[in-house]
Image: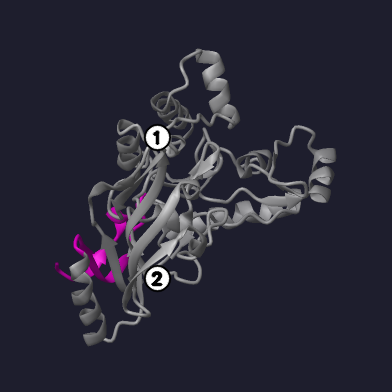
Amino acid sequence: MEILINYNLKKLNTLAIEHYASYFVNFNNENDIEDILLFLKENSISRKMFLGSGSNLLFSKNYEGLIIKNEIKGIKTIFENEQYAIVEAGAGEIWDDFVKYTIQQNLFGLENLAMIPGTVGAAPVQNIGAYGTEQSNCLFEIFGYNFTTQKFENYNFDECKFGYRDSIFKSQLKDQFLIIKVRYKLNKSFIPNIAYKDLRNYFEKNKIELTAENIYNAVCEIRDKKLPNPRQIPNAGSFFKNPIINKTQLNELLARFPDLPYFEMDAENFKLPAAYLIEKAGWKGKSIGQAGIFANHSLILINLGDANSKEILNLAFNIIESIEILFNIHLEFEVNII
């Protein structure tokens, strides 16, 4: 394990924004945590952050502190019976590789979460979700290290306090709890989930068998058509959360925008696609400087070449302002601004 100084972060975030960290370390063994603690103490460093693959963040400035990149690997089944298995994955595993592994093992529940960039350790922090499911639907337990208590700890489902793109690790335990291993409870019997409109339409159109592998492939195909590959067009995925409004707000908006799509969460709350709002406000395909909105999906902000963080944020805040004016809705960042 080596601590690096003044480390360029451009290759460690999928928006390819150039900022520097005062200190940087990657580690692949939980025993290294003791050395990391010692380094923080000896150098009087109070600020730290944990980094996965940098696929859901924007560095807005240089990072004054230590960035800790977790590369702990390994996947194994730690319990199983006739109905389900509990599979443990190291936080440094690539999420999509893990999803493919579960399908190959005939373990089901994560197949709708195909091709989401990032690591297994980052998945519960953001409570990633797509195509009608969230990782929390299968989450069993999380094992990691608490830098505040200086102890290894487990968090079960209830203790994780999952919400829409949220968890205790993103709020109360942010930059305190380092996720080392994640355990998922996966079914041995396959129950297809194609409630999401695009997915349902795909199977109706192609008339193919409903298997976990086919759902995985369908999601990959749909994503490929909509979303840019960050290796080819730098981006951080969905930049904004889909806003949640009440029934009164929904009825008011439907009177003005009859084609407004919405998803009923419960009797009083409804989720709107932020992409629709942004497109309706005229932003799709537009740009400011080297920061732009992807032409095929208005929820994706992209680096057109050599954008800096100020240009990305300027574009984002302009979008937020126009959505507030047109819809009286405040968009919130899904991307983490560091």
Q: Earlier in the sequence, mark 1 or mark 2?
A: 2
Q: Which residue is mark 2?
A: 175
Q: Which residue is mark 1?
A: 188
Residue 267: percent from left, percent from top: 77, 46
Residue 241: percent from left, percent from top: 58, 51
Q: Residues within 10 Å of mark 2 (few under 14, many from 20)?
A: some
The reply to whether the magenta stretch includes residue 14 is: yes
Question: Vertical placement of 286 versus 338: above or below?
Answer: above
- In the rendered view of the protein, which quadrant contains the N terminus? bottom left
Three-letter amino acid code at the position of disc 2? Asp
Q: Is residue 102 left or right of residue 7?
A: right
- In the rendered view of the protein, which quadrant contains the C terminus? bottom left
Q: Nearer the viewer, residue 49 or 133?
A: 133
Residue 138: percent from left, percent from top: 46, 46
What is the span of residues highlighted in magenta in the rendered image?
A: 1-29
Three-letter amino acid code at the position of disc 1? Lys
Of all residues, the one furthest to the front in this rendering is 82
Residue occupying image coordinates x 20% and y 63%: 27
Q: Nearer the viewer, residue 138 or 214?
A: 138
Determine whether the residue tagged by mark 2 lies in a helix, strand or loop: loop
Q: Nearer the viewer, residue 212 or 292?
A: 212
Question: Vertical placement of 115 versus 252: above or below?
Answer: above
The reply to whether the magenta stretch includes residue 237 is: no
Q: Is residue 151 visible?
A: yes
Residue occupying image coordinates x 45% and y 65%: 169
Which mark is in front, 1 or 2? 1
Q: Is residue 270 left or right of residue 192?
A: right
Q: Is residue 15 visible?
A: no
Q: Residues within 10 Å of mark 1 (few under 14, many from 20)?
A: some
